Image (cartoon, helix red, strand yellow):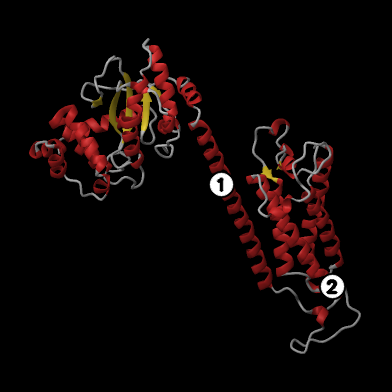
Amino acid sequence: MKKSNIIEWASVVLALSALVISYNLLQKHLTGSFAIGLFDMGCAASEEKGAADCAAVLDSPWSYWPPRVGENKDKGGVPVALLGLVYYSVLSVWLIGVGKPSRPKRWLHTLPLLLVGFGLAGSAYFMWIMFTKLDQWCSWCLVTHVLNLFLAIFLLILWPRKHKIVARDNHANLPIQNQRHPSARQVTITILAMCLAVFGEKQLVEKSNWQKQAQFYDRYVKEMMNDGLRMYRNWKKTPVTAIRVTDDHPVREHHNNPKILVPVVMFSDFECPACRRIATFMEKQVQPLFAGNLAIVFKHYPLDQSCNERIKKPFHRHACEGALLAEAARRVGGNDGFWSAHDMLYKNQKTLKAGKMTVDMLAGATGLDAAAMQTAFASKEAQAFISQDMIDAVAADVTGTPTIFVTGRRVDRVAVSAIKFWDSLAEHYWKQIGKQRPASTKLKKAATQDNPGQPVAP
């Protein structure tokens, strides 16, 4: 094998090695851990000044370009590790796809040389930052800069030169040094491969960012759901929203003593699984904390584009139908009729979702007059009542279900399904009305470990 061929393949190996290191550095930057555990060696966390600590370097404001310092402190910036990944992936694809061109096409070799020239300037800058601005340094970052220096040297050596000995190509009958390598097809394919590599890296970063955000949200949810007092204080800071409630709106209350009710307004959707879970949670677990003194007002907000113009694509396809069924039951059977239909619709949510819930079925299950319900179901008054609820939802900035307001203050979507929030709220309720909290309303220790479901999504 010729010396030039050895150097050419060595360049490929160096570029691929730097590519793998850059990928791991990017993963460390985005997720907090290397993709390959081997890279933890020689770069462990250390508070000692002048020690090798990759995490400290990758967490610094200088790990972005432009750096998040001075006027750019609160701005974005691209991770330097991502720049390295793109740089070495483009070099790797070029060296594999094109390699060393023949002398007639030596101008092509100026492209990787120019790229490496910029890369060397970048390496010098980032090494200066690492050793002058930061207390720790990154050993794997240093390795990529050293590999970049060797790549520059190898590419200079690979510059196409004249050959003293001229051989003939038996197929083309041309001197070897006059053969035109690479072909236009090779260059085109190489450039396309470079574009695909950059696109793939962009997708990788977006996925990693999503995973990082999801991990952060999971940690946040776990911490919040175990801190009832913190959730209560956050709720208390929420501004009061005026929500229209009339005598016609269905209210679930249990008329217990002392009859000092806590007003709760719930915007809900009969095809929404989270709404079904929260409805059961409120009745079975939250109401007992207040000795049944929550007055839960139901307001319609079906996430169905057939009656809700804010829903732009099919979602809960039969939610409007469910709202009309419940409203028909209220018009025929009053408050009790509504809540009987409410429970029945949630109990048979799969039937509603399949579009098989009929007026006759609901009337038979609730003991209401089917003919009267059919008339109410088709009435403009029922539709207007539901439409007004949706107007109220827009005014209250409701975008999803269930959305709950207690004494006019919106309950955070994490707190909605957190029993500890409701327990803290109950504790303040009993103090506010000046009565000692009954033992029967206190949260049992086993219940504090229960989670009725995932936090409600908007």
- Which residue lies at the image location 86% right of the left edge and 74% below the top edge? 3
Q: Position of residue 343 (x, y in %)?
A: 24, 36
Q: Residue furthest top?
A: 434
Amino acid at pointer 1 = Gln
Image quarter of the N terminus: bottom right
Is residue 163 or residue 332 the one in the foreground?
Answer: 332
Q: Position of residue 345 (x, y in %)?
A: 23, 40
- Which residue lies at the image location 33% right of the left edge and 25% below the top edge? 288
Q: Badge 1 local density, few (<14 within 10 Å), some, or many (20+)?
A: some
Q: Residue furthest bottom?
A: 170
Q: Position of residue 379 (x, y in %)?
A: 15, 35
- Which residue lies at the image location 82% right of the left edge and 41% below the top edge? 51
The disc at residue 4 is: 2
Disc 1 secondary structure class: helix
Is residue 328 or residue 164 the one in the foreground?
Answer: 328
Horizontal side, residue 27 vs residue 361: left or right: right
In the displayed structure, 403 sits above or below 5; it is above
Image quarter of the C terminus: top left
Q: Earlier in the sequence, mark 2 or mark 1?
A: 2
Horizontal side, residue 327 vs residue 421: left or right: left
